[in-house]
Image (tube, rainbow, N blue to C red):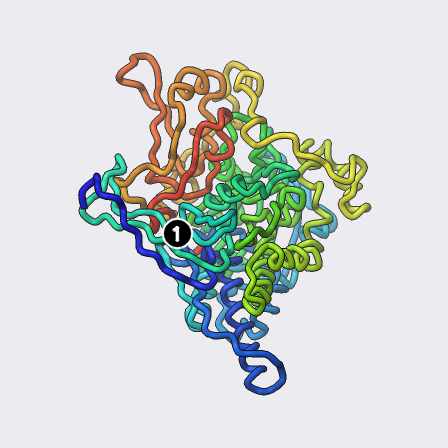
């Protein structure tokens, strides 16, 4: 095929297309297949009137090399939605690590700790389960395939297809392109997948849904999206040193200029999960959750739990933090959106798995109605939003609708206002709907204002000395993610104006992307063409798909696009 030849794309017709093989998308697929089977069984038994539904081609697209490879979470699972989806989930082999038997909350200073006398309700987790989300999603994927659902891993959806303003499917990305976009010998054009209904379940800041939402105005009248960035490690500790089933949250050290907190989970086989989450609308230009995570492990309280251990896994991702008022319109002609892509995360409790599952199931129930009616217009699909409003999704998210806006005032400054939120069911004293007036990239302060003339001499900005056991530099941590991209394919990280990075951003902000990125993707290196200056180097093959760069560059100068299908992290344990 010559470069000048027009690309000929294969078209595949499917009935239901789900973009994203995470917990929300897989729950939608599995629940829909179960509902169709139940419908047909009841008709065969004479307990339901109507006609059987013919076999439906339910297709799930997953950009990772396999289901679960891009799944990263805390993860504490509230089992309420899982019990509804699969009442016998334990007998079906659900990969639960253990049940939560103990929870606690601490405030940490640099060397000491203060335990909360009672665990605040948002952090009470006894009876929930500790899981690996990557293992959980692999298991859900297997259950889908056992029911005949088509899962296509390694296929990234890069463009939505429209007809007369309705979504009618997607185009998958081309494979086998060189760094300049030319076609290599192994070039494979992306496919056109046409569907009656498309369910967007891409996870946090879904790259395709961002395009769809903008085109269709699905965020009109909503608060802007804001996000948090979380990083975590799994540490293998010496035999007999870890009591499983503990969930511990902390605030305070090591976060000094950023809002956030930490979590510690203890697993069977003497493993400990240590993680940290920070608000991406921080003013700190040197915000670096990876560095903060390494600092956290130096605290005597944490170090005593993990001493003698070794980090065996690492990962990072963003999660939506805007809550109820940042949710988009959930439906349009031919499409619905579920889970993290729809900002369905309870940021007060740091939980979204059960909400994503429930959203997927409600989208499945709406899809069944559309199949029976033969109508996939917004008029039919709007019942999905009605179902969401009557479900646990609103029950959990409505009381937290002003939480991010309130906590953004600072941990201590916000305390009386957070108390008011608890008493009033989320209304608070500042207004029934607190607006978010900014996007994450707009909040960064100049480094001189934030840290003074010598920012790197401040102890808060020091990385503990890496030892290859408990403490790692960022590049060594990336190795633990198993991240892989074809280094000869086009970069999926598009920097609009690199001169801004050199001429303005480095001096004014000390290049925030060099710090907030948890994967050492961005570096300012000596510019050989202009001696005495630095240029931005983009190590796109390091990218672990957290998408922080897409939302936190102070000049909104970086565009995260979907790389060739199959690239990215290879999470297995986290």
Question: Residue 150 appears at what percent x and percent y?
Answer: 40, 65
Q: Nearer the viewer, residue 246 or 38?
A: 38
**Mark 1 — residue?**
63
Percent of width and height locating residue 288: 49, 33
Relative to 467, residue 37 above or below: below
SS for dot 1 = loop
Q: Determine the residue positioned at 81% across, 46% down.
A: 423
Where in the figure is residue 317, as x and y percent of width and height?
Answer: 49, 44
Crowding at dot 1, Cα within 10 Å, few <14 / some 14-19 / many 20+, comes out as: many
Residue 323 visible here: yes
Question: In the drawing, does residue 41 fall left or right of residue 525?
Answer: right
Closer to us: 98 or 449: 449
Residue sitting at 51 percent across and 34 percent down? 551
* 456, 8: nearer the viewer: 8
Residue 52 x %, y %: 53, 78
Q: Residue at x 52, y 25 (%)?
A: 285
């Amino acid at each position: 095929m010559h470069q000048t030849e027009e690309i000929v794309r294969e078209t595949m017709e499917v009935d239901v297309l789900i973009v994203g093989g995470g917990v929300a998308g897989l729950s939608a697929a599995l629940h829909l297949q179960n509902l169709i089977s139940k419908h047909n069984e009841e008709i065969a038994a004479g307990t339901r009137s109507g006609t059987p539904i013919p076999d439906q081609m339910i297709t799930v697209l997953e950009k990772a090399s396999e289901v679960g490879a891009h799944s990263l979470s805390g993860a504490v699972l509230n089992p309420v939605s899982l019990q509804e989806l699969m009442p016998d989930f334990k007998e079906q082999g659900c990969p639960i690590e253990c049940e939560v038997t103990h929870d606690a909350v601490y405030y940490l200073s640099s060397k000491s700790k203060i335990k909360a006398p009672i665990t605040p309700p948002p952090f009470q987790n006894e009876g929930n389960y500790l899981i690996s989300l990557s293992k959980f999603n692999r298991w859900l994927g297997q259950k889908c395939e056992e029911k005949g659902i088509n899962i296509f891993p390694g296929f990234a959806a890069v463009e939505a297809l429209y007809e007369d303003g309705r979504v009618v499917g997607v185009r998958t990305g081309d494979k086998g392109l060189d760094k300049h976009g030319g076609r290599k010998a192994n070039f494979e054009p992306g496919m056109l997948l046409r569907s009656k209904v498309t369910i967007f379940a891409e996870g946090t800041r879904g790259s395709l849904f961002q395009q769809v939402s903008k085109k269709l105005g699905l965020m009109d009248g909503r608060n802007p999206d804001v996000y948090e960035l979380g990083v975590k490690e799994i540490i293998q500790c010496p035999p007999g040193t870890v009591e499983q089933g503990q969930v511990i949250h902390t605030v305070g050290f090591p976060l000094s200029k950023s809002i956030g907190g930490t979590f510690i989970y203890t697993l069977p086989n003497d493993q400990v999960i240590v993680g940290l989450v920070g608000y991406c609308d921080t003013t700190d230009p040197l915000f670096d959750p990876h560095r903060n995570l390494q600092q956290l492990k130096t605290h005597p309280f944490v170090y005593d739990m993990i001493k003698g251990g070794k980090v065996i896994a690492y990962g990072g991702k963003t999660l939506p933090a805007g809550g109820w008022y940042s949710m988009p319109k959930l439906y349009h002609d031919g499409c619905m959106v579920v889970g993290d892509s729809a900002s369905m995360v309870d940021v007060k409790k740091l939980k979204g798995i059960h909400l994503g599952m429930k959203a997927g199931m409600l989208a499945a129930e709406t899809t069944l109605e559309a199949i029976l009616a033969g109508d996939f217009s917004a008029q039919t699909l709007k019942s999905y939003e009605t179902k969401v409003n009557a479900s646990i999704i609103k029950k959990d998210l409505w009381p937290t609708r002003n939480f991010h806006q309130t906590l953004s005032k600072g941990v201590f400054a916000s305390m009386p206002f957070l108390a008011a939120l608890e008493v009033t069911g989320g209304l608070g004293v500042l207004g029934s709907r607190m607006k978010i007036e900014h996007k994450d990239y707009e909040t960064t302060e100049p480094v001189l204002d934030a840290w003074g003339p010598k920012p790197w001499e401040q102890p808060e900005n020091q990385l503990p000395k890496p030892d290859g056991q408990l403490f790692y530099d960022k590049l060594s941590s990336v190795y633990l993610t198993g991240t892989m991209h074809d280094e000869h394919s086009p970069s999926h990280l598009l920097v609009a104006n690199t001169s801004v990075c050199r001429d303005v951003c480095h001096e004014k902000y000390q290049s925030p992307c060099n710090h907030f990125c948890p994967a050492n993707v961005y570096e300012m290196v000596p510019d050989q063409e202009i001696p005495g200056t630095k240029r931005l180097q983009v190590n796109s093959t390091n990218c672990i798909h957290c998408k922080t760069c897409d939302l936190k560059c102070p000049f909104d100068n970086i565009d995260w696009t979907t790389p060739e299908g199959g690239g990215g992290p290879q999470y297995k344990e986290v």
